[in-house]
């Protein structure tokens, strides 16, 4: 089969406007390799969390053609104050959408499901009904198992997760860190597992043109969601320790992002007397993030649990060296040529690594870091790996 004859359907567990912009970019990158790509999305909306989408999302399926992909989207309205019934109803919602699209004549050769929770389960049931093979890509940091007692995978999840993993023709993890927990749940799927990393737009995230102006500060930047698992509190406390060092008087920290801990982190910054050294920008779009990265000297990722760390490769694509925690995926991305890794949740180690970065930042080659990122995480590189995997599965089906 020629790549141009290949029809792929992408079913993500979440999708814009309810997060998941990465899944849209991933689908566009796959389409850029030549196949036809259809996205079936069921973005969730709760009356309390997202009243605008809940009330304005409509009840029919919306269809758009843009950037080389065909999108079918229908809002799923969650029932308040309940979880398990919503999972069951969301899966049913996706199955209903697929049936309508299939009857209309759009019949994929293969399906790409993003995350076992819960697109993987829905697509496993589609495979049972229609016989269509599928690739399941796992993105969720909870499968790293790095937050003991967090309860992120509950007992009632296990049968559903097994259904998804056992049904998949191939299970892609975005880092090796995710595989051990998957194998604890489903030991016999080991031969299905492979690693394909996440991608970034290396044509957008590029080093600044020319040299930066001479300055008397050293600017760290962190792009993250302001929630506990992302470790921003640890970063601020580590930065407070760093500022006590005589050699770190010129250190500055910019934190880009929003989230439920925004007020708490602002108060923590004031309590530690860091108002003049720490800046919170709130949420920023892609272009403004690029500007912030190009102004910075180094990137910091303080996560406690991370499946991969797309923001790391965005920073590296701009040539920035990185200080990252060994929280899962980041330990597989950041090598000695790109930066420093430390234990997650250890404020003293993080502060020490940031000081070390300040002292030796000039020893890192920005162009080499950017080139390494392009060669390993560029859109065409990663999308090409997916195309080869799809072809292998379909050819195996023909041979069988």
Image (tube, grey):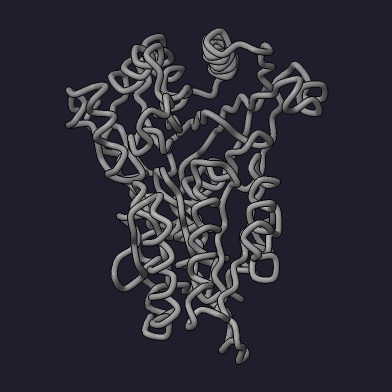
**Residue 103 visible at all:** no
Q: 51 above or below 5?
A: above
- Coordinates of residue 383 in the picture (x, y in percent): 41, 50
Kindly identify the residue that appears in the image at 37 percent across and 84 percent down.
363
Could you say where residue 298 lies in the image, as x and y percent from the top left? 49, 72
Front-most of residues 242 and 326: 242
Q: Nearer the viewer, residue 194 or 182?
A: 182
Q: Quadrant of residue 142?
A: top left
- Name the spot of residue 380 as percent of width and height, x first: 43, 57
Q: Could you say where residue 251 lies in the image, as x and y percent from the top left? A: 56, 76
Q: Residue furthest bottom?
A: 214
Q: Residue at x 56, y 32 (%)?
A: 39
Looking at the image, residue 116 lies above or below residue 341: above
Location of residue 184 (image quadrant): top left
Image position of 288 (left or right of 232)? right
Q: Where the C terminus falls, by quadrant?
A: top left
Quadrant where the image shows the N terminus: top left
Which one is nearer the viewer's eye here, 250 or 188? Answer: 250
Answer with left or right where residue 36 lies relative to residue 72. Answer: left
For the point 54% across and 24% down, which residue is it? 106
Q: Please name the residue shown 43% across and 57% down the image.
A: 347
Instruction: From this view, report whether residue 374 is shown above or below residue 399.
Output: below
Q: Is residue 106 visible?
A: yes
Q: Splitting the image into 4 quarters, where does residue 145 fall?
A: top left
């Amino acid at each position: 089969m020629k790549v141009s004859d290949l029809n792929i359907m992408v079913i993500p567990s979440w999708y814009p406007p309810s997060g998941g912009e990465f899944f849209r970019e991933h689908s566009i990158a796959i389409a850029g390799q030549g196949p036809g790509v259809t996205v079936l999305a069921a973005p969730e909306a709760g009356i309390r969390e997202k009243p605008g989408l809940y009330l304005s999302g409509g009840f029919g399926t919306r269809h758009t053609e843009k950037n080389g992909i065909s999108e079918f989207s229908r809002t799923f309205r969650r029932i308040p104050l309940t979880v398990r019934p919503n999972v069951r109803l969301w899966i049913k919602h996706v199955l209903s959408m697929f049936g309508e699209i299939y009857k209309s004549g759009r019949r994929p050769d293969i399906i790409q499901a993003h995350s076992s929770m819960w697109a993987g389960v829905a697509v496993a049931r589609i495979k049972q009904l229609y016989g269509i093979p599928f690739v399941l890509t796992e993105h969720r940091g909870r499968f790293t198992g790095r937050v003991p007692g967090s309860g992120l995978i509950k007992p009632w999840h296990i049968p559903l997760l097994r259904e998804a993993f056992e049904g998949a023709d191939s299970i892609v993890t975005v880092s090796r860190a995710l595989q051990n927990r998957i194998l604890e749940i489903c030991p016999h799927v080991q031969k299905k597992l492979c690693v394909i990393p996440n991608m970034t737009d290396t044509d957008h995230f590029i080093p600044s043109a020319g040299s930066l102006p001479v300055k008397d500060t050293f600017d760290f930047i962190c792009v993250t969601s302001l929630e506990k698992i992302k470790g921003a509190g640890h970063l601020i406390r580590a930065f407070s320790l760093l500022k006590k060092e005589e050699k770190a008087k010129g250190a500055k920290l910019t934190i880009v992002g929003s989230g439920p801990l925004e007020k708490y982190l602002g108060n923590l910054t004031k309590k530690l007397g860091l108002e003049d050294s720490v800046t919170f920008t709130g949420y920023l779009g892609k272009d403004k993030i690029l500007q912030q990265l190009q102004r910075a000297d180094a990137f910091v990722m303080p996560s406690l649990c991370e499946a991969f760390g797309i923001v790391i490769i965005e920073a590296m694509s701009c040539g920035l060296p990185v200080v990252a925690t060994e929280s899962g995926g980041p330990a597989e991305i950041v090598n000695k040529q790109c930066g420093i890794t430390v234990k997650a949740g250890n404020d003293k180690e993080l502060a020490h690594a940031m000081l070390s970065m300040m002292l030796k930042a000039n020893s890192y080659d920005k162009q080499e870091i950017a080139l390494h990122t392009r060669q390993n995480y560029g859109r065409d590189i990663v999308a090409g790996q997916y195309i080869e995997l799809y072809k292998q599965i379909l050819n195996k089906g023909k041979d069988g």
